[in-house]
Image (cartoon, rainbow, N blue to C red):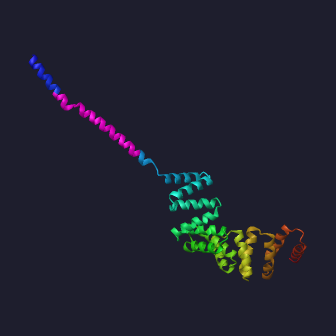
């Protein structure tokens, strides 16, 4: 029996070594640990952002929380490392305008326009900055480019208003007037615009247009004492009695003891 038992033990030992080698299991465990460790290091490295990206993200986050001074400082640090990121420069110039730092904003927008001279957004910002700095020639040019390129675009109304304002400041009323009429078609219920159109029409001796604009101004908005006073000669010349009565009454609301208009109203009611 011993002769039979001993060979069986040897057989089981050999089979165990064949299917469960201890050194192989240990090696596999060691290799698995090494692979896991290496994978962890790779993931950690991929998640680390470069310093300039961290600055940019921080500047964006802080700007949305209204801490503009700190945000501007972070953008300036970013530009030391990466001076030519167009999107960052765009965000920076908007922040500068919101902060009223127009001198630096003018330098940044010039750099952006050198990058893309046809961008309506950059041209609009350039025009906006030029208006604040009273560089009206440049403002008229930039705003005019925006409106001419895209008269139905998102920036059209601001561009048209900006161009009109610049031309008025340059005393180029003949150039401003047709643009004002275009603006009136787009924005027909703006009191200041209608008043300017009435005055400019009168200066250009276009009585019919002046009458129409004054009528709209006084019936829709009520007008000022000056509006009533300046429109009276036009309504008298045109024989517009109903508008004259409106003007006399309107002026007396501002100056209730102005006797000439009391007399005019008295005569009107006695005659009618």
Image quadrant for the N terminus? top left
| Picture quadrant where residue 41 is located | top left
Q: Residue at x 57, y 69 (%)?
A: 123
Residue depicted at x 74% and y 76%: 199
Q: Is residue 185 visible?
A: no
Q: Position of residue 204 (x, y in %)?
A: 72, 82
Task: Write the residue at 84% across / 67% down.
Answer: 254
Count of numbered circles on the image: 0
Residue 135 x, y percent position in the rendering: 65, 72
Pick out the residue farthest to the top. Answer: 1
Q: Position of residue 44 (x, y in %)?
A: 42, 45
Q: Could you say which quadrant of the image residue 167 lies in?
A: bottom right
**208 relative to 158 in the view: left or right:** right
Question: In the image, 193: left or right of 111?
Answer: right
> Is 32 inside the magenta-drawn segment?
yes
Q: Which residues are magenta?
A: 14-43
Q: Quadrant of the C terminus?
A: bottom right
The answer to if 37 sits in the magenta stretch is yes
Question: Which residue is at the front of the view, 227 or 143?
Answer: 143
Main SS type for the magenta part? helix
Q: Identify the image quadrant of residue 140.
A: bottom right
| Residue depicted at 60% across the width and 59% down the height | 95
Q: Does residue 25 appear to the left or right of 268 in the view shown? A: left
Where is 153 relative to 29, above or below?
below
Residue 220 in view here = yes
Farthest front residue in view: 80
Residue in the foreground of this view, choosing between 264 and 184: 184
Whole-percent x and y of residue 210? 73, 78
Along the line of sight, the residue nearer the viewer: 48 or 256: 48
């Amino acid at each position: 029996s011993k002769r039979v038992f001993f060979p069986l033990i040897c057989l089981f030992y050999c089979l165990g070594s064949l299917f469960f080698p201890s050194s192989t299991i240990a090696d596999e465990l060691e290799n698995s640990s090494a692979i896991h460790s290496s994978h962890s290091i790779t993931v950690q490295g991929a998640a680390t952002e470069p310093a300039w990206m961290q600055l940019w993200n921080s500047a964006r986050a802080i700007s949305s929380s209204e801490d503009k001074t700190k945000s501007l400082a972070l953008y300036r640090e970013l530009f030391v490392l990466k001076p030519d990121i167009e999107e960052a420069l765009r965000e920076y110039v908007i922040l500068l305008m919101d902060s009223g730092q127009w001198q630096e904003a003018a330098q940044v927008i010039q750099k952006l326009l050198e990058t893309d001279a046809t961008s309506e957004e950059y041209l609009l910002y350039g025009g906006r900055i030029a208006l604040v700095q009273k560089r009206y020639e440049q403002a008229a040019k930039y705003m005019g480019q925006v409106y001419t390129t895209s008269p139905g675009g998102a920036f059209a109304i601001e561009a048209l208003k900006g161009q009109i304002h610049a031309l008025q400041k340059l005393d180029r009323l003949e150039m401003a007037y047709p643009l004002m009429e275009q603006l009136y078609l787009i924005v027909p219920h703006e009191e200041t615009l209608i008043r300017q159109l009435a005055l400019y029409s009168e200066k250009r001796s276009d009585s019919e247009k002046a009458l129409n604009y004054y009528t709209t101004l006084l019936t829709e908005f009520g007008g000022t004492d000056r509006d009533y006073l300046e429109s009276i000669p036009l309504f008298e010349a045109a024989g517009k009695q109903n508008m004259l009565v409106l003007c006399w009454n309107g002026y007396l609301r501002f100056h209730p003891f102005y006797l000439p208009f009391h007399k005019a109203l008295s005569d009107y009611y006695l005659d009618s």
